[in-house]
Amino acid sequence: MKFKINIKRVYEIPTEKDGYRILVDRLWPRGVSKEKAKVDLWEKKIAPTSALRRWFSHDPLLWHDFKMKYQTELKNNKCITEIISLIKLKKIVTLVYAAKDKEHTHAIVLKLFLENHCL
């Protein structure tokens, strides 16, 4: 096995199968203590910029444009190489996020981006 990247809401119960847990939100999730979140790393810099996050506002009608804009941000993000190295080192990583909408979250875009760049 080379590596595995999972995504999971921070409100779901952490398990050993999660491996190394990285919170990929710019803001700390509401109502979750650090003990309960059980994240190994909080990487704020990998999240969409505040401007992009506010523009998108989890509107499914903006999803396609959001994905393209966020991918552009990721291509120019200096943290990507550090995250890729960490994934290769840890082998199993779970990207943890807080959004309610599991189909229109930046974590999906980030996961696909990282998988494409970890090969």
Image (tube, grey):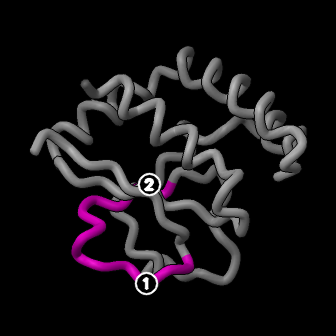
Measured along the vertical axis of the image, is residue 33 above or below residue 18? Answer: below
Measured along the vertical axis of the image, is residue 36 above or below residue 65? Answer: below
Q: Amino acid at mark 2?
A: Leu
* Residue assigned mark 1: 13
Q: Amino acid at mark 1?
A: Ile
Q: Position of residue 14 (x, y in %)?
A: 37, 79
Q: Which mark is residue 95?
A: 2
Query: Extreme left residue here?
Result: 1
Q: Secondary structure at mark 2?
A: strand
Q: Which mark is residue 31?
A: none
Q: Which residue is found at the position 80% from the left and 28% from the top?
A: 65
Measured along the vertical axis of the image, is residue 40 above or below residue 80? Answer: below
For the image shown, how many numbered marks are present on the structure?
A: 2
Residue 13 covered by magenta stretch: yes
Q: Which residue is found at the position 25% from the left and 40% from the top?
A: 86
Left or right: where does residue 44 sit relative to residue 94? Answer: right
Q: Position of residue 104 (x, y in %)?
A: 71, 51
Left or right: where does residue 36 sit relative to residue 75? Answer: left
Crowding around mark 2 (Cα neighbors within 10 Å: few <14, some 14 to 19, many 20+) is many
Region in magenta: 11-23
Q: Position of residue 63 (x, y in %)?
A: 78, 40
Q: Which residue is found at the position 66% from the left and 51% from the top?
A: 105
Q: Secondary structure at mark 1?
A: loop
Left or right: where does residue 88 sit relative to residue 83? Answer: left
Crowding around mark 1 (Cα neighbors within 10 Å: few <14, some 14 to 19, many 20+) is few
